[in-house]
Image (cartoon, rainbow, N blue to C red):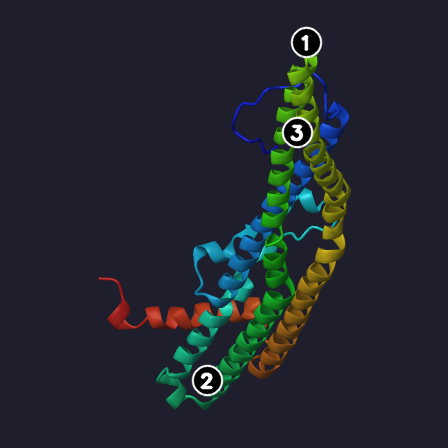
Amino acid sequence: MLMIPFKIGQPKKQIVSKTVERDFEREYEKLQKLEDQTKKLHKDMKKSTEADLGPVSTNCYQTKNWTYSAFSALPSVSTIIYGVKAMSKAAVKISADLLSNPLCEQDQAFLESMTALDTAMRRMDSFNQEKVNQIQKTVIDPLKKYSGVFPSLNMAVKRREQALQDYKRLQAKVEKYEEKEKTGPIMVKLHQAKEELRPVREDFEVKNKQLLDEMPKFYHSRIDYFQPSFEALIRAQVVYFTEMYKIFSELTDQIDQAGLTDEQRERETEAKLSELRALSIVADD
């Protein structure tokens, strides 16, 4: 709860009930948590797309869990794997390097396989870029705009707190004159203090009621606001991985003409390695 850091005369009369004050603090605390979690989600989504477009690193293969209590009424966004997506740029470079390998000039079959791989990697990178652009527009940008609302909300709470402090100060002033002997000058001052108090009290009551009415509405609005973004995020991931399945299925059909199993390929590789080890130039001394 925001407090104005200065001392004032405290009135004897309780001008805001404990129930109302507890309700206000509860609703505002929920919005503060919502603000923090929105910022965290925005930051993590940016990291995700940066990982999609950046170079592969050990961090790219870590799983991020997003479970935010403030969004408990929404489907959680969890276990988004950076690694597969972050590989696209590196995969394009690897396939290009393989194409430039001298072996491609000597072996037509190897050249055709590497060409197919390079085409697949470039298609993967293209779909990855489309996915990142879609997430930027449908998830990250809306998150940023939503976060931009909270400064105005916090300012409204500060204005309400300032009005409350003014209300307490003037109420204490009125009570002070009410306790004094009812002389002419005191009655004049009491009347002036009450007149000064009236608009301040009304101002506080308006601000207090407005926030008590609107803070719960703002909090519950997060569901309707974020639901389309999370649905768009899911659709973008589904489209991306569906296309990846198609790309690698086609690539498998192009380069796996022999139809060997992984075990057969491993035995074949070991046999060729044994032949290389048998050469005198690599024999142990």
Label 3 secondary element: helix
Asked whether residue 65 appears in the rendered view, the answer is no
Label 1 secondary element: loop
Q: Which residue, given by chain and number where applicable, does mark 2 sit on?
A: 110
Whole-percent x, y for residue 94 in the image: 43, 74
Residues at badges 3 and 1 in contact (C-beta under 8 Å)?
no
Looking at the image, residue 100 sits to the left or right of residue 283; the answer is right
Q: Which residue, given by chain and number where applicable, does mark 1 sit on?
A: 181
Looking at the image, residue 117 sits to the left or right of residue 96; the answer is right
| Amino acid at the residue labelled 1 | Glu
Asked whether residue 100 appears in the rendered view, the answer is yes
Whole-percent x, y for residue 3 in the image: 57, 31
Quarter of the image with the N terminus is top right
| Amino acid at the residue labelled 2 | Phe
Q: Residue furthest top?
A: 181
Of badges 3 and 1, the one in the foreground is 1
Could you tell me how far apart the alpha carbons at marks 2 and 3 are, in whole angstroms? 84 Å
Could you tell me how far apart the alpha carbons at marks 2 and 1 are, in whole angstroms? 107 Å
Asked which quadrant contains residue 247, the reply is bottom right
Whole-percent x, y for residue 71 in the image: 70, 47
Residue at left 74%, top 32%?
23
Whole-percent x, y for residue 134 in the image: 62, 70
Could you tell me how far apart the alpha carbons at marks 3 and 1 are, in whole angstroms? 24 Å
Q: Which residue, given by chain and number where applicable, does mark 3 sit on?
A: 167
Q: Nearer the viewer, residue 248 or 274?
A: 248
| Amino acid at the residue labelled 3 | Tyr
